[in-house]
Image: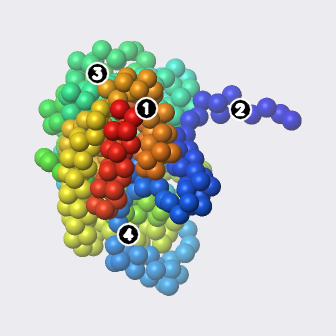
Amino acid sequence: MKSFSTRMPRLGTENAFSVIGKAKKFEKEVLEPQGKKLIYLQIGEPGFDTPKNINDAAIKAIQENQTHYTPTAGIPALREAVAKDASKYSATPYEASDVVILPGGKPVMFYMLNALIDEGDEVIVPNPSYPIYGSVTQYLGGKMVPIQLKEENEFNFSADELKALITPKTKMIILNSPQNPTGGVYKKELIEEIAKIAIEHDLWVLSDEIYDRMVHEGEHVSITSVPGMQERTVVLNGCSKTYAMTGYRIGWAITKNKEMANYIEQLACNDVSCTNTMTQYAALEAVTGPQDQVDYMLSEYKKRRDLMVSLVNEVPGMHCHSPKGAFYLMVNVRELLDKLSITAAELCDRIMKEAHVLILPGTVFGLYGDDFVRFSYVSTEEHIKDGLARIKSFIESIY
């Protein structure tokens, strides 16, 4: 049988899904026969159901037989609504033609990188970060250049650190704010400095703004708010996190660069033809309909954040700052790892098997995650309290 392509070994995955698969197996085979359950405090999934008005819009679309192909770039009404919404953060208003509707956020990463990266091209990627950025870069033969998000700097990096990594082969910078997995939010001053560097060195920017509505302190600042950046930036956004629509698989790419928009549309046409039609009508309702549920979810996440931060800092060997955005908590466990002579992955495995709580090792998110574990505060207050009580009791017993 003929061999597989030489590209495939370079393609990574989301190790978080592997961890969840292992946890589900452990829960079913070991815990359930004992009448026990795991508490999941790791998941990057909104802790609420999709608002009813959005689900109703999807049902209505099916009932009205909106079940056929749409233009590859999406239905005009949704593209217009997304452009209007994105214009709030941009120095130049967006138009419908600047928007390509896609089945989730990952295709934005995949298509933009495909349109840009040749063998040997370098992409500067924040680290720790969402693993797919680096996975696709390396799959295409590019080189991922990590820039460390430092805990002592509220998980920002500095302009000088960015400049030091730029070489003649640098083609692109990836930004994510608010961040997964750290919950960090880039400061306005840093955004402006990054923009200046990108323009000076003629670099592209992928700005992953999927958590733009989830800012607990301050405000979201898009790099497209800086004049001159709209033509060299692709904004990634969508409905998954803000509207609790992960299973709908609906996202979009936004850029003032017409050639890039055309390439993204062309890649989408070759890959998926178009995005699910009824999902697009659900997204239209999400973007243009009432936003009270979004505000409610954000207020609840903030309460749960405050609760989890307080409880985590009571656990021996664990400490964290209060994140300014998203719904993640990056917890420093270096003291605990050194004391027990184990890795973050081994610590999380023991917490799962002995405390029956699932969290993620920071190494799932890259090289600079080895001092950390990641929690998510989307769970109920009851689960957060119970889970942290279990972890505290377990750590105290072995510390």
The crowding category of the residue bearing disc 1, from other C-alpha atoms within 10 Å (few below 14, some 14 to 19, many at least 20), is many
Quadrant in which the N terminus appears: top right
Q: Nearer the viewer, residue 69 or 302?
A: 302
Is disc 3 placed on a helix, strand or loop?
A: helix
Question: In the rendering, at what x and y percent does residue 315 appear?
Answer: 28, 40
Q: Nearer the viewer, residue 230 or 182?
A: 182
The residue labelled by disc 2 is 5
Which is more foreground, mark 4 or mark 3? 4
| Residue 89 seen from this side | no
- Type of the residue with mark 1: Ala
- Check residue 190 in the rendering and tell me which mark sits there, or answer none: none
Report the Cα–Cα distance between label 2 and label 4. Answer: 41 Å
Place of residue 163 in the rendered image (x, y in percent of width and height, measured from the top left): 28, 18
Rounded to the nearest angstrom, the CA distance separating label 1 from label 4 is 32 Å
- For marks 2 and 4, the one nearer the N-term is 2
Task: Specify how the rendered protein is coloured.
Answer: rainbow
Mark 3, residue position: 162
Name the N-terminal-most of marks 3 and 2. 2
Name the residue that disc number 1 marks: 344
Residue that badge 4 annotates: 49
Q: Which residue sits at x=52%, y=34%?
A: 135
Task: Return the residue nearer the eye: 377 or 102.
Answer: 377
The answer to whether the residue labelled 1 contacts the one labelled 4, judged by CB atoms less than 8 Å apart, is no
Q: Give the residue drawn at x 34%, y 17%.
A: 165
Query: For this view, does 310 lie left or right of residue 182?
Result: left
Amino acid type at mark 3: Leu
Q: Residue at x 46, y 50 (%)?
A: 356
